[in-house]
Structure formats: structure tokens, C-alpha cells
Image: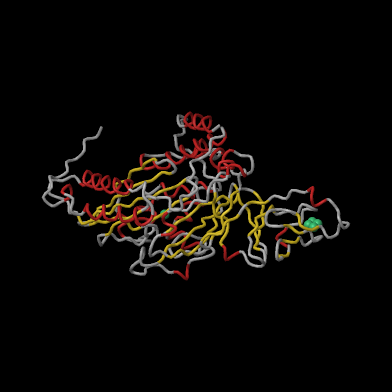
Amino acid sequence: MSGDYQSIRAERRNQPMGPNHGYYLAGRPPEDPELTHVGPGTPCGEYWRRFWFPVELTEQVTELPRRLRILGEDLVIFRTREGEYGLLHLHCSHRNASLEFGIVEADGLRCCYHGWKYAPDGTVLETPGEPENSPIRHRICHGAYPVIEYKGLLFAYMGPPDTRPPFPVYDTFNWPGHDLVPYRISYPCNWLQVAENTMDPIHTVYLHTRVSNVQFEPTWGVTPLIRFHNAERSLYSTLTYRWGDNIWVRTQETVFPSFSGVGAFWEDAAREKVFFRSSITKWTVPLDDTNCMIIAWRHFGPGIDPDGRGKRDEVGLESVDFEGQTEQRTYLQRQLTPGDYEAQISQGLISSHAAENLGVTDQGIVMLRRRLREGIREVGEGILPPRPAPEDTDIPLYIQDTVYTIPLLDGEDDDALKTAVTDAVMEVVIGGDALRGEARRTFIEDGLRALKSDPRFAPDRAPYPAVAEK
Ligand code: FES
Ligand SMILES: [Fe+2]
């Protein structure tokens, strides 16, 4: 369908009134449903239902049940008085009253209308208005999903029970010196355009620095050398900046379908460092086709924020401590210094890919969509996405920041030098894949520190010549 639209549009460019006349270009082509629609039974919805992902902040689930909408399903989440979490289909199996108005009891949730009671696993425990010994409760199946509480977030698995993967615990969830604070922000738009942000690193130069003044650090206004790479379960990018005599290598990663980590947004590349990890660990989770949320941890503590730049008391429900992430500013402020929130929701309720014109800086977006489409089609064919080993509770991520002082030599090509430094950094980081915990951390930190005295980057090295364009 989008192909038709593009050819009609191309034809109209030749009209005598001129190619830009709005009449010939009016209307928006439709979205790509294969990548954006997530309801039950849709290809992308089935794909999403093969992963664990967070659905709510633990602190939001109190003695009152809480209504949620996730992957186009209306749900209720609650915590029994005995401390067990339940995630159920919202409408009571008796006569459809919403369980958000129910009463939490010791072992379940009781519907407000006629008192039926549900266990966290969906078992109907009581049907008090029915005759004693009525068999009706044994005939009823009420939808329920498994829930795991982890570090202030409640994770759900909404797929078939027999394809349930192990709960994934990545290395940055337990990094020394990091203290995780959960937060959640609602976005009134499709999940994909929010999730794509991490694979669109060039926007940081413009949106966050040159257009909206300096929202983070002046370093972000330097155009980095950007490269994208495929890994088995993820895509990662390396962004390499020249800042005075320093070279800053940042690695960002997006693990499918939408989990990502980002280094410190206050990074000023002023001091040498090796293997600093995430300041944000986030999931972009679809609520339905036109709403999503970022549900995440901000990382505080000396291991990521030695100068105490973060503001912990600004992190929580619909709030985070860096600019341009929510709707909470005035419209004028949002117009004058727009941030990620404005850029992403303004792409439309569901951004139309057919209306885009992607350039060379959009390679990460192209790769992300291609991998996502492959994953969605594979699930349609019964092939499961890569999953962690059950005993693996420290899955390696590549997200990191490393800064070295390596002045540019006379006659040297800086892009060639930055490429060599980046390759050397990533060789060390990837070289630790088979290790876990302290062993991996020590291996990588020692390897990266050793690069500081590596002859390839010493002041007496032969200058790196420009690499000829192929
Ligand atoms: S509708 Fe819930 S008990 Fe009747
Ligand atoms: Fe951004």
C-alpha cells in the first residue's frame, strides 16, 4: 500500500504546478502495521509476547488494585495482603465489572459487583452469591499472567506458557556502585518511534545541543563518528567524539524488542575513564497501538555519577531528572526548547515510515526495523527469539563510556584514529563475553586501561592516514 502511495507521489512531482505544491502531497501514507500493531493475534503483538518486560512500578501497586493497558489488553494488577502479585484480565468473568473496583484480600482480589474472588493465578476461589457447592467456579478460566518483582519494577510475561523464557538479568542491573531508582513516563504515541531513539544518535547533536541549546553537555554538539553493529540478540552503536585532546568512545545498545541503556547524559569527556556503564536502563513498552511508556531505572551512586549530577528526588512517576522527557513543561517551553518527548510524539500517533526520507545517518533505524521485522516473521514461523540461558544471571551488555587523552598528531586523520581507538575498545569489551561478574569487569577494565599505553596510540605512533572512500 505504501509502495502505491510513493509511486503516486513520485508521479505528482512532475505536475506543472511544481513539485512542492501541497495539493499533490496532501495526506499521510498509512503506518506499517507489521512493526507497530501489538494487540492480541497481531504479528508484532505475538513477537512482544515472547519476552519478559516491565509493566508497572512496584510502588504504584498498593492495597488498591491498579488498572493497566498493556499490548492492547485491559488488565488489573494487584498485590494480595500476603504479598503475592497478580496480573489479571480486567473484566470479571461473571458479568464483566472491572476488577479495578475490587477489594484486595489476603489471597486474592474480590470483584465489587457480586463478590467473586480471584487468586493471582486467575483461579476463581469463591462465587458467594451462587448456591453452596456450585460447580460454576471450576468451569471458569480467568486470564492471568505471571509477574516477577525486581528492583522496584513489576515484570510480566504475556506469551504462551510453553515459550516462557528465563527472566533476563543483565550485568548493569547489579553493577558495583550503582543504585537503581525506578521511573515511568507515558507517551501518547506508538512504541516504535520512542524505542527507535537510541538507534538515532545523530539527534543528540541537533535536538539536544544545537537546536534546543545545551540540554545535557556541550560535548553532545560535536558530531561523533557513528557506527552500527549487529549482535545476536541486539544492535549496538559506537559513538566516538573528539573533545580537545580527548577521545570519548560511547557504546549504546538496544536489546530486542526495546530494552536499551544509555551512558551518563552529563558526560563531558573531560577526564580519562574506562568502562563507565548505564545512567539509564529502560524499556519502551506498548500500552496499545497509540500509547506507550518508558519504564526504567535511573542509575545513581559513585559508580556512575561520582560528581553527584543526578537529582534522585525528581525521578518517579511521570518524572525524570533530565530535560525534555515529559509533557510537564508549558507548551511555550516545549516549543522553545523541545526535547525527546516533543520530537517523538510529534511524529504522529503512529509514525508513517512511508512518509520518511531516510539518509545515511539513519542506518541504525533501518537496521533496527529490519531486525525487528525478521524477529516478528520468525515468531510467526514458530522460531523463538534468542533467550538467555536459565542459569545466566549476569548477561553481558556492551553499554559503556571510555575516555582517553590521545591528542591528534600533525597530518593525522582524526576519523581514522577514532576508528582505530573504537575498534580496540570494542575488541576488549566483546572479548569479555564468556566471563561473568567480577572476572569480566576486571578483564575489561584492565584491558581498557592497558590501551592507554598501547603503542598504537602512543605520542610517537605513525600518524593514521585517511582511509580512502570505497
Ligand atoms: S461481575 Fe464480578 S462478581 Fe459479578
Ligand atoms: Fe534524545
Q: How many marks?
A: 0
The quadrant of the rendering that contains the N terminus is top right
**Where in the figure is residue 110, as x and y percent of width and height?**
75, 61
33 relative position to 464: left or right = right
Residue 194 in sight here = yes
Q: Nearer the viewer, residue 130 or 242?
A: 130
| Residue placed most toward the observer, 18 or 340 | 340
Q: Residue furthest left?
A: 460
Left or right, 128 with reference to 245: right
Residue 137 picture location, percent across and down: 80, 52
Residue drawn at x 32%, y 55% is 401
| Quarter in which the C terminus is drawn | top left
Q: Measured from the top left, where is residue 138 in percent x and y? A: 79, 50
Q: Position of residue 244 (x, y in %)?
A: 21, 57
Tell me the quadrant of ligand 1: bottom right
**Residue at coordinates 39% horizontally, 40% vertically from top-left?**
230
Q: Residue furthest right?
A: 131
Decide which of 176, 457 is in the foreground and name it: 176
Which quadrant of the view contains residue 363? top left
Q: Is residue 132 left or right of residue 21?
A: right
Please give the name of the residue rendered at 31% of the width and 56% of the height, measured from the top-left corner: 442
* 108 w.r.t. 451: above or below: below
Which of the pair 407/339 is nearer the observer? 407
